[in-house]
Image (cartoon, rainbow, N blue to C red):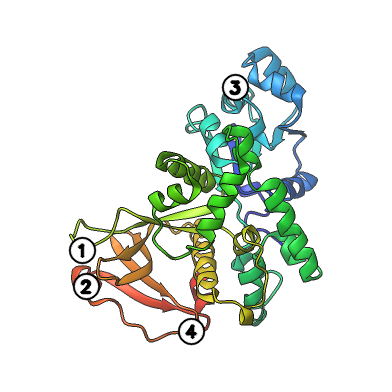
Amino acid sequence: MIKRIYDPLEKNIKENKALIIYGPRRVGKTTLLNNYLKNTKFKYKLDNGDNIKLQNILKSQDFKKILSYAEGYELIAIDEAQQVPNIGMALKILVDNIKNIRVIATGSSSFDLSQKIGEPLTGRKTTITLYPLSQKELLYKFNKHELTEKLEDFLIFGSYPDIILAKNDKEKIDFLEEIVGSYLLKDILTLDKVKSSSVLLNLLKLISFQIGNLVSLNELANTLKIDVKTVDRYLDLLEKSFIIVRLGGFSRNLRNEINSKSKYYFLDNGIRNAVISQYGSLENRNDIGQLFENFIISERIKKCAYNKIYGSKYFWRNYEGKEIDLLEERDGKLFAYEIKWTKDNLLAPKNFIENYKNSEYKVVNKNNYLDFVL
């Protein structure tokens, strides 16, 4: 077992507030919850959002039924809470009407759970997101030298807990094939009534080959033979279900800067490779640069979330083709990062330096990346 960044959960649990744990399927939300419950001093009730009886009670918004359900308990925990209609209102009734109650709800679908919880629980919740294992979390198991030795493994198979604990490559491939085949699109297909999983998978395949490149919605729409609005909606759903992440273009409205297109990355390298069924070693691949860039972007997202480094993330590119892979805007200052597998002496684009003097520039490569993501 690998210690998670939020383990133990005690510091995030407060009286008469709900702790909402978001995250992709199979990243360890249930394990994190169960580990906490094993050692809690509170009398608790654990339930699952798939439970029809629970759904009927909580969706009723009947005060008497809901309060009776929780009577005598100090803590209510609901796993897969996104399955419960009107879950936000039910949790509001609990935290508002039972003295000293504590509530934990986990959910694998941020777009659905947030819509059901956000407004009813305004000021009554703490929210955390659990990602596939970060390099910082893996330091509990490996030292820095071992992490760098395993870099190729992370680039190919990603860092879901099952991947890290797998005994061999076959087990890793079996897990990734299973998650893409059975879990990856489940929330979208169930909760947003998207009819065709094949179109979503084909969209993901197209995105997987465009890591680090500007994505044209019109080109995607033409290839998939669907309209642009549908492509845009599907991309939004894939992002909100923790499969991909989007970077928009940074611009201060200068004429030569691109800000109308986006770049997309996968939250986990293993999922990206599983979508296109490519598990070959680095020496036999022509996409090492894309794999490394995707890995750095996703690990940086984890680091910023876990270390509470607040700011916005972009890419920068002008019409002359000059670009910067990652731009972070924090406290009114710009931090520019060029992500390259091997190169370490790249200079910042002249136009960028001239226009944004209050900025820092750094090249992130395979020799120094740990400093950037830990």
Instruction: Report whether residue 102 is seen.
Output: no
* Three-letter code for the amino acid on which mark 4 is drawn: Thr
Circles 1 and 2: CB distance less than 8 Å? yes
Circles 4 and 2: CB distance less than 8 Å? no
Residue wearing tag 2: 351
Q: Nearer the viewer, mark 2 or mark 3?
A: 2
Circle number at residue 131: none
* Three-letter code for the amino acid on which mark 1 is drawn: Asn
In three-dimensional space, the C-alpha distance between marks 4 and 2, rounded to whole angstroms, equals 24 Å
Circle number at residue 93: 3
Rendering quarter of residue 53: top right
Residue pictured at 23% horizontal, 77% vertical: 350
* Three-letter code for the amino acid on which mark 3 is drawn: Ile
Q: Nearer the viewer, mark 4 or mark 1?
A: 1
User: Label 4: few (<14), some or many (≥20) within 10 Å?
Assistant: few
Residue pictured at 53% horizontal, 36% vertical: 114
User: Label 3: few (<14), some or many (≥20) within 10 Å?
Assistant: some
Residue wearing tag 4: 342
Give the mark nearest the N terminus, 1 or 2.
1
The extreme bottom residue here reads 345
